Image (tube, rainbow, N blue to C red):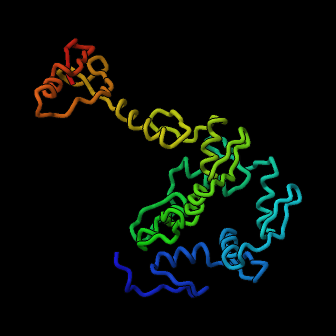
Amino acid sequence: MNITHRRMQICDKCGKKFVLESELALHQQTDCEKNIQCVSCNKSFKKLWSLHEHIKIVHGYAEKKFSCEICEKKFYTMAHVRKHMVAHTKDMPFTCETCGKSFKRSMSLKVHSLQHSGEKPFRCENCDERFQYKYQLRSHMSIHIGHKQFMCQWCGKDFNMKQYFDEHMKTHTGEKPFICEICGKSFTSRPNMKRHRRTHTGEKPYPCEVCGQRFRFSNMLKAHKEKCFRVTSPVVLQTSGPPTAATCTTWPIPTRVPEPRSTTELSLSSHSPASFPEYNCISSQTHLKT
């Protein structure tokens, strides 16, 4: 999409400029309302991560003046401290009605619930594609802009989002700040640590809607679905006349796929009808081939 001659969209609240109207709308919904203040320059933000980025970029990693009274970890703002304090309590009052998993924060439960409902509340106004999470929509929007703004100075790889860029940079620095509290193994990102932790807890958050079997990882569910949908598709074998309970039964489709046609004599012989399995109809004892 050619966007070089498009008029810039300007936010009437903060003056920030955007190429696309959808970017401006997303900005006004998520970033423009201001209620968290920077202690260094009094600039206000809606999101903690926006304030965090502002402090790093504008103030050059400003001093962390606020400490946790329990573990003495330091933060840029008291809002960060209050958010961190939840980690010290064992109280998990927010419980998922579907799987029973509990959370310390209501927002964590809300995000978790999307796994079960399949709801995708965030829609791209350019192509109508929908997403479960806001960060997925933000990342997707870059394909309409046509460039990736975060580039690694070490290897030249570029990224749509700073989150992915930061995780990538840890592969060069060797930093692994996320530690499994069960075995002590460390990881470059929190999602990787959470996936690893399931090997200890046995948690299986991905259910198959066909057979009910549950899986630890989404790729395992995907592989299972390919097999499950194929095996459970029925073939109806029946005698002449209307089907009844006595004359009709269902059989699973065989999972073996015959070889495709080939010009070689060897491949043609292996593809002959004699190589296919036979099935018997219970009522007529007739031999049937697939």
> Please, which residue is most extreme toward the front here?
154
Name the residue located 53 percent from the left edge and 37 percent from the top edge.
215
Task: Give residue 129's position: percent from left, percent from top.
Answer: 42, 62
Q: Residue 24 location in percent, x, y?
A: 51, 79
Which picture quadrant has residue 185?
A: top right
Compared across the picture, whether 257 is left or right of 92 comes to left
Provide residue 86's location: percent of width, then percent of height: 78, 55
Q: Of all residues shown, which one is farthest toward the right? A: 69
Residue 138: tell me if it is visible: no
Q: Foreground residue, 283 or 288?
A: 288
* Image position of 128 with respect to 5: above or below: above
x, y (%) of residue 29? 58, 74
Q: Judge by depth and name the residue closer to the eye, 64 or 51.
A: 64
Foreground residue among 282 and 207:
207
Residue lying at 60% horizontally and 44% vertically, measured from the top left: 195
Q: Is residue 278 visible?
A: yes
Q: In the rendered view, does 254 fall on the left or right side of 268?
A: right
Q: Is residue 209 left or right of residue 114?
A: left
Q: Quadrant of the N terminus?
A: bottom left
Where is 105 relative to 212, above or below?
A: below
Give the image quarter of residue 238: top left
**In the rendered view, would you say 260 is above or below 192?**
above
| Residue drawn at (36%, 30%) of the image | 231
Q: The C terminus appears in which quarter of the rendering? A: top left
